[in-house]
Image (cartoon, rainbow, N blue to C red):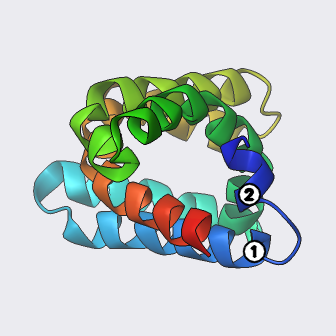
Amino acid sequence: MKLSDGLLDSSKKAMVVEDCCNVIEAQLASKSGISGMALKTAFAALKGVKPGYVPYVVEMILPQCFEALDPIWSEGVDKGDPVGYLIASRDRTADALLSVTDEKAKNVNRPIVRGTYEKLRGSAKQHVEDAVPDLAKVIDKYTQA
């Protein structure tokens, strides 16, 4: 079974989206300094695009994200610890997730969204790597349920 099969069924999808948005919020809250302020400002701009924009985007990209993560997660299942493996492979995990967002960003029609993404893309990998442990726990929570 693929990650998207189990995580995006109708009984779990809204909860998965909410938990992923909570991971994003927690990561933003943990950032400090100038780069943290820039991230928080950019995220506020994205939230201002329209109400519910961030959960909408998360829901839209989750199938592709889970598809991109599926090989790494499956390797972890084979090794007996998919959460630990995803965390240990955070570099690869971040690259997989960013390949999805990079592709989506190319096709965004909203200049503020595309511009914000392009400005922050250079530092995105580290931020995504930082979020991998929490994301792995979310995935584990719903693959176990």
User: Which residue is painted at 72% across and 54% down in the image?
Assistant: 57
The amino acid type, in three-letter code, at marker 2 is Gly
Sequence-wise, the earlier of marks 1 and 2 is 2
The CA span between labels 1 and 2 is 8 Å
Q: Is residue 143 above or below residue 2?
A: below
Q: Nearer the viewer, residue 128 or 79?
A: 79
Report the mark closest to the observer, 1 or 2: 2
Q: Is residue 13 left or right of residue 78?
A: right
User: Which residue is painted at 75% across and 74% down in the image?
Assistant: 12
Q: Is residue 29 above or below residue 102?
A: below
| Direction left: furthest residue | 33
Q: Is residue 86 above or below residue 132?
A: above
Residue on which disc 2 sits: 6
CB under 8 Å between discs 1 and 2: yes
Element carrying mark 1: loop
User: Which residue is painted at 45% across and 54% down in the image?
Assistant: 42
Element carrying mark 2: helix
| Direction right: furthest residue | 10
Task: Give x and y (percent) for residue 52.
Answer: 74, 74
Density class for disc 2 (Cα within 10 Å; few <14, some 14-19, many ≥20) is some
Task: Give x and y (percent) for residue 126.
Answer: 24, 36
One can see residue 124 in this view? yes
One can see residue 51 in this view? no
Rendered image: mark on residue 52: none
User: Which residue is painted at 74% across and 57% down in the image?
Assistant: 6
Residue 36 in which image quadrant? bottom left
Residue on which disc 1 sits: 12
The amino acid type, in three-letter code, at marker 1 is Lys
